[in-house]
Image (cartoon, grey):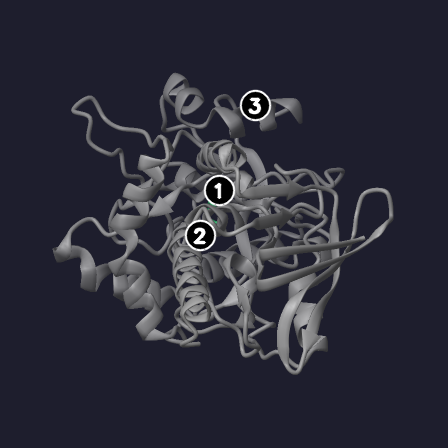
Amino acid sequence: MRLSVDVVIVGCGVSGLVAALSLPEQLRVLVIAKGGLEESNSILAQGGMSVLLDETDEDDYFADTLEAGHGENRECTVRIMIGESRSALDYLRELGVEFDTDSQGQLDYTREGGHRKRRICHFKDYTGREIITKLLQRAQQRDNVTFMDHTTMVDILESSGTCVGVRAVDGQGDELEIESGWTILATGGVGGLFEQSTSFPIMTGDGCRIAREHGVRLENMDYVQFHPTGLYSPGDVRAVLVSESTRGEGAVLLDAKGERFTDELLPRDVLCEEIRRKMEEEGSSYVRLSFEGLDADAVKARFPGIYESCLERGYDMTREPIPVCPVQHYLMGGIHVDENSLTTMPRLFAVGETSCNGVHGANRLASNSLLESVVFSRRAAAEITRQHAACQTGTA
Ligand code: SIN
């Protein structure tokens, strides 16, 4: 079957949906998803979305991001992400996304590893689900946006070095040739290639692999992040994430003797190393995370998703420490893009975890991924809008 649209978006996590919603309504947009429409890593995001608190926070936020990233970040894109963070937050709230507030109605910021301040907006411990639910509702209301689930991209279409669409296979096994003016890859990361990951297994780096086959530049594909605290549960297909915000709110890591052995809010890669060293020393597959110092009812109210997931696996985290260990979590590298998410191939864009715009450097600062997805997907849509207008007026 042959289809023709203005823009095809491959992937329906936060970055794919924000791009779809940010494009002008006169453009025909098709979003294809490898699994179900809710099968994206974004929906699993617990901790939240980091934002600039106010102008006095700018240098601190910049320094935290660079320190976590070992200075390998692209400084100009970090400045863009931080500078556009408040407007990204306003944009989501205007679309109806809710974030927790305190009794005065002010945002209830939490803290995670590597942040010197509480600057993370969240909705309980299922921020990603709240964002995806609202974005999906909005996108499904749009007349110009169509969705095809269980449809896998198998190639991109190239003509004279320019991307002109994608080839895909739908749920019935039928091949589709989707011609498009512009193509956005939002296929997530590579977690499905790892034995233990917080990712859905369908995230197998398709966008990066196919882009590379066409000579599109990739960057830092070996920069893979492990999350310090996945629930140790060997039978699980996908590791249960135990958000860093649990540690931001006071949960502590314990060794086999029940003693603290590290600073729980170190940047992720440093903390993973501390935990690995402790596991090796003890000959164990996990360490323990204890909520003992926290009020049990407050824990259940603040972390209902994690509480339930642990309970389903036989652990009541309000009564006993839970076993945790580092698990694959995120790809900092990806398809090299500029500050407008354009790849090295004309008319081919990449956003979210699939892309590498350099904001994360060698190690992503916690809760910078939802923010990065919103900011740079909006920029991709703005650039496509500009290019489309230039084509219409013959100034392209
Ligand atoms: C978490 O809640 O710990 C994960 C958030 C993130 O990956 O940034």
Q: Nearer the viewer, residue 183 or 84?
A: 183
- Name which of mark 1 and mark 2 comes first in the sequence: 2
Residue 43 place in picture, x, y as percent: 54, 39
Mark seen at residue 254 = 1
Q: Is mark 3 within 8 Å of ligand 1?
A: no
For label 2, the SS is loop
Q: Secondary structure at mark 1?
A: strand
Q: Nearer the viewer, mark 3 or mark 1?
A: 3
**Identity of the residue drawn at 24% across and 34% down:** 107
Is any part of residue 360 visible from this angle? no
Q: Residue furthest right?
A: 173
The earlier-in-sequence mark between 3 and 1 is 1
Nearest the viewer among 159 and 308 is 159
343 left or right of 71 in image: right
The residue identified by callout 2 is: 23
Q: Amino acid at mark 3?
A: Glu
Q: Amino acid at mark 1?
A: Leu
Left/right placement of residue 160 relative to residue 364 reads: right
Can you tell me whether the CB of the residue at mark 2 lies under 8 Å from the nearest atom of ligand 1? no
Q: Residues within 10 Å of mark 2 (few under 14, many from 20)?
A: many
Q: Label 2 to label 3, Cα distance in Å?
A: 38 Å
Amino acid type at circle 2 is: Leu
| Disc 3 and disc 1 in contact, CB within 8 angstroms | no
Give whichever of discs 2 and 3 has the lower sequence position: 2
